[in-house]
Image: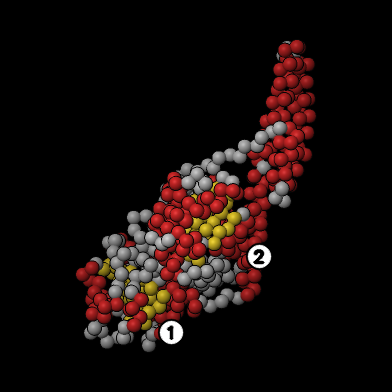
Amino acid sequence: MVLFSLVATHADIDLETVAQLSNGASEIATSALSGSPAVTGAVVLATCNRYEIYGEAPHPDDVEAARAALVAQISEASGLSEPLVSRSFSTRTGPEVTQHLFAVSAGLDSAVVGEREIAGQVRRALITAQHEGTASSGLVRLFQAASKTAKDVGAQTALGSRGLSIVSVALDLATDLSENPDWTTKKVVVFGTGAYAGATMALLRERGCTDISVFSSSGRAEGFVATRGGTALDAESLRPAVAAADVMIGCSGSDTRVEADELALVRADSPQPLIAIDLALTHDFDPGVGELDGVELLTLESVRLAAPQEQAESLAQASGIVSGAAKAFEQEREARSVDSAIVALRRHTMSVLDAEMEKVRARHGCTAAAEEVEFALRRMVKQLLHVPTVRARELAANGQQDEYVAALEALYGITVEQPAARAVPQAECPVDHSDRESA
C-alpha cells in the first residue's frame, strides 16, 4: 500500500480557486472509492484556506490512476475543467505525505502560523472519513499520528502560545480599523453556527462584547445561542440587526450571501461605520460590500497578509518535532510493510517442519521420543527464523524491504501477497453534515 495526497493551499493558489475546488468536497472520498479500484482509502481536509485529499493506493503504479480519478470527481463536483483542477493540486507520495500533514496539523503551514484551530480540523476530517467508511487503516494511523504530533508541538514549544488564530487576527484588524476600539460597546452580527462561529463567539466574549446576534440560513441559530449566549435572528429580524451593527462577521459559507446593493439599502440610514469580516471560504459577503461608503471589508486574504510571524526559535523547535515524528512514523510504516514477508517465511518454514513431523509420527507413532524430536525441531526453527526476522525489520527501516521480498522469492520461491486495504469500522461522527456552514 502507498500513501499519497493532493494538496491545494493558500501558499500556491488564490483562495477563490480553493473555494471553487471545495464545492462538493463532502462527497469526494465516497465517490472516489466507489469509482476507482486505484483508491482504497481517502480522507478529505477542507478548511478556509486549503483543500487536501489524502489517499491510499494498492501499489505505487496506481497513484497516477488514483489522482486522475480524484481530479475527475472534483471537476464534476466543482464545475471546473479537469485541466484546471489538475494544475491546482500538487501531488505528494511517501514520506512527503507524512511530513506535510504533520506540519499542517501542528499549524506550521497555516496562514496564521501556529494557530491551533487546524489541529481540530484534522481530527474532524478523520472522524468524518471513519463515519463514511472511507478511511483505510493506513490513513487512520497517519491522521492519529499527525494529531499526536500537533499535541506534542503545543506542549513542548511556545508556538501558538499567544492564542493566534484566523479569527483573532481578524478581530485585531477590526480593532485597528475601528474609531472606537472598545468591544464592550459594539453590536455584532455573526453569520453561521459552525466551528468558526463558535470560536468567534468565544473570542468576542473574551474582548468584552455582549451584544451579539447570530443568523443561520439553516435555522440553527436558536440552538447555537442556547449554549453560547447571544440573540438568535431569523430572516425578518436580520435586517434591523444589520442596520444597527458595528461589525458583521461571516462564518457560514452557505448559499445565502449578503449582496452589496441589499446592504446599501439596509444601511442607508445608519450613521455609524460598519466593519464586515468575511471568514467564509465561499464568501458570505459580496466583495462589492467593500466599495460601499462607510463599510470596511476584511477577508481571509486580509488576515493572511496581516498575520504576525512567530518567533524563529519556536518555529525551529516545532519544525524539529514535526520532522522527528514524521521520520519515526515512516520507519514504523516501513517495518510494517515486511510483516507479510515475515509471515510468509514463517508459514513456509513451519509447513516444511509439519510435513517432516508427519513422517516421524507415521514411522514411530505419537511416542515420547517423537514429541521430544518435535520440540527440538521447533526450537531450532525458531532460532533459525530469528535473524531473518530481525534483518527484515532493519532492511525495512532503510527502505530496502523490496530486496528482502525479492530474496525470499529467489531463494525459497515464496510469493508474498500484500494484504488488501482494510477499512476501519465506522465510528460515531460528531459533525453534522446536513449544514454547509463552515467547520
Q: Is residue 82 left or right of residue 368?
A: left
x, y percentage for residue 379? 76, 29
The numbered mark, 1 or 2, whose residue comes first in the sequence reads: 1
Task: Say which amino acid is labelled 1.
Answer: Asp
Which residue is pictured at 42% across the width and 61% down the height? 81
Residue 320 image label: 2
Which residue is pictured at 33% across the width and 74% down the height? 286
Disc 1/disc 2 C-alpha distance (Å): 35 Å
Query: For this rendering, which residue is in front, 395 or 174?
Result: 395
Q: Is residue 180 left or right of residue 36?
A: left
Q: Which colour assignment does the render follow? A: secondary structure
x, y percentage for residue 377? 77, 25
Q: Answer yes or no: is residue 15 visible.
A: yes
Q: Is residue 326 left or right of residue 109?
A: right
Task: Kindly state the secondary structure of the residue where label 2 is placed.
Answer: helix
Q: Is residue 216 above or below residue 373?
A: below
Residue 198, by quadrant, is: bottom left
Which residue bears the numbered disc 1? Answer: 176
Q: Is residue 348 above or below residue 359?
A: below
Query: For this rendering, which residue is in front, 258 or 143?
Result: 258
x, y percentage for residue 279? 40, 71
Are the residues flagged by discs 1 and 2 in contact, CB closer than 8 Å?
no
Which residue is pictured at 33% across the width and 64% down the height? 254
Task: Kindly state the secondary structure of the residue where label 1 is placed.
Answer: helix
Residue 423 image label: none
Which residue is pictured at 45% across the width and 59% down the height? 82
x, y percentage for residue 166? 46, 72
Task: Say which amino acid is labelled 2.
Answer: Gly
Query: For this rendering, which residue is in front, 66 or 204?
Result: 66
